[in-house]
Structure formats: C-alpha cells, structure tokens
Amino acid sequence: MTGCEEKDRTRHPPFWEPGRIIGVIGGRGEMGRLFSDFFRQCGYKVIAADVGAPPDAREVIEASDMVLFAVPLHRTVSIIRDLLPYVHPRHLLMDLSSLKVAPVKEMLRSSSQVLGLHPMFGGRISSFEGQTLVACPVRIEREAWEFLRGLFTRMGIKVKECTPEEHDRMMSVIQVLFHMTTMLTGRVLRELGVDISDTLEYTSPSYRLEINLLGRIFAQNPALYSAITQMNPYTRNILTLLKEGLESYENWYGSENLEGFIEDFRKSADHLGPFCRTAYQESSAYLDYVTRSFHAHSAPKGGECAREAQDSS
C-alpha cells in the first residue's frame, strides 16, 4: 500500500477519489514532477503538460478532473489566465506558487472549485515527512477539502490553512525579508571584492553556517527569488522598514553612539522573548554538527595518518 492508503479510508466525495485524472501544467519542472509522483502514489492518474512537448495544456485540462498549475511564479497568473477558457465548472483548480493572492484571484475568475497551495519545500526533497504545506481552500466543498487534506497529512506533511492575504503577508517576512537581506549581503561582498575562500581561513562554525546558507540562495534560480521579492504585495513595507533601520545604524555610527546600537539590540531581544534562548540552544546543536562534519571531511582518511607518520620518520 502507498502512504496515502495506509490508514482507514474515510468517506469522501466520489468525484475526488483516487483513480481520477489530475492534469499537471508544468509537469516537467521540479515541483511538477514531485507532485505528479505524490498523486500517483495516492492512486490518481496523472497527465502532464509542459513547453515543447505533447500533449498541450489545453488537451490536458480538457482530459482532467483536477488541474494543478506548477509553473514559474512570474508566469503563473498569465498562464492561468490564458488557460481559463478551457476550464469547466467540474474542475478543481490548484496552484503551487509562492504567492497566493494574485494566482488565487485569477483562478476564482472561473466557475471551478479553487484550492491554493504553497509547498514550503523544494522539488528535490527525499521525503514528505515533516514538510509544511500552506493551503488556501478558498472555494472548495469542505468535505472534499478534508479528504484532500488527509492525503497530505497521511504522507507526513503538516498542513497550515490560511487566507491568501494572510499567506502573502507572512511570506513577506519568511521569504522577502530574509531573502532580500541575504541578496543584499551577497551584493556587498561583491562590491567589496571579497574572496569567500579567504574569509574561510578566519571562519568560526557560525560564520561557515551563515555563509553556506548565503551560498545556497545564490546556487538557485534567480528568476524565482526575483519574483518572490518583486511580486509580493507587502514588499514595499519591508523595504521601508529596512531603509529606516539602516538610517538609524548610520546615524548611530556617525555620532559614535554605542548606546543606540545596544538599546536597539535589547528592544529586538525583548520582542523575540524566550525564542532567543531556544534558538541559541538549537543553533548550538547545528554548529556542533557543522564542526564535526567539517573536521571529518578535512581529516586524512583511513591509513593516511599512518603513512604520513612513516614518511616523516
């Protein structure tokens, strides 16, 4: 049995039962392939459409009971708009984009049922266990949504329900704020002409972890990160607050006001509260692992120490 079938089968609307056809628009991309495999494991028939290969998107939609848009964020709305003429009221429309307000609004222009989804993980994961999926069940029968929700949870996925507006507001913090500050750090390193390999000669485990996370961002698709930051409706507020913070730091630096930095630091620490202590403990465990891993990879492998000892004798 698959992970979706392991537990007792609860009552659900026949229309959504396994065996139905799910058309994946963008089925050859990482997320398209991942969710195609997910639904196949749950007993659905999957047909995929992608650029430059048959069948085309219209044929896939017309042959499907459920349609999943797994396309690049910056093209999601336009692709949905172009394909809406082929959508039928019997369809369930879903999308996997990192923003929800605009794609969901576009899908709601149809008369179909609509479910916005945002996987908080990439397409290269080895397991769904412990992963988080944000869901916006904006126009779907409750019984149908509860059944579909069960498919995800039985695979070990944690499902967080919210409105599209709540989702995008939270993503302005989780994604925009942290991605933008990371990209800005990369920009400063570039402008300074810093050679990362040189900095690693001075590194602490915490710096190595931070610089690895920075490198992880720049190893990925720039179009995705550009779209995440540019298209979020709450990005302007994040930019305003970042600029205000930088201006304060600049003023304190210019006036040699050490107390300004200290007081601001304390206010942020008070706001974060007990989380600071928890984060310190958890990150210390991560750093211990990073340190052990680094030394394990940099140490001579079996037999090499003995050979080096013999050579030096």
Image (spheres, rainbow, N blue to C red):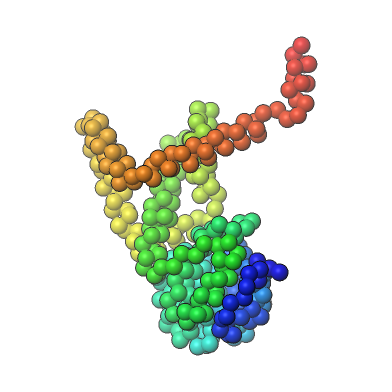
Q: Does the rendering let one see residue 269?
A: yes
Q: Is residue 265 above or below residue 80?
A: above
Looking at the image, residue 123 lies above or below residue 180? below
Residue plotted at (32% across, 41% down): 269
Closest to the observer, 208 or 76:
208
Return the x and y of residue 199 as percentages of the image width and height: 50, 31
Above or below, 88 relative to 107: below
Q: Residue furthest top?
A: 313
Q: Is residue 28 visible?
A: no
Where does residue 156 sit, x and y in percent of width and height?
58, 61
The spot of residue 200 in percent (x, y) is 53, 31
Q: Residue at x 42, y 36 (%)?
A: 192
Question: Residue 33 is drawn in which quadrant?
Answer: bottom right
- Viewer-nearest residue: 158 or 126: 158
Q: Residue at x 49, y 44 (%)?
A: 214
On screen, residue 260 versus residue 57, left or right, reads left
Snapshot quadrant of residue 65: bottom right
Q: Residue furthest front?
A: 8
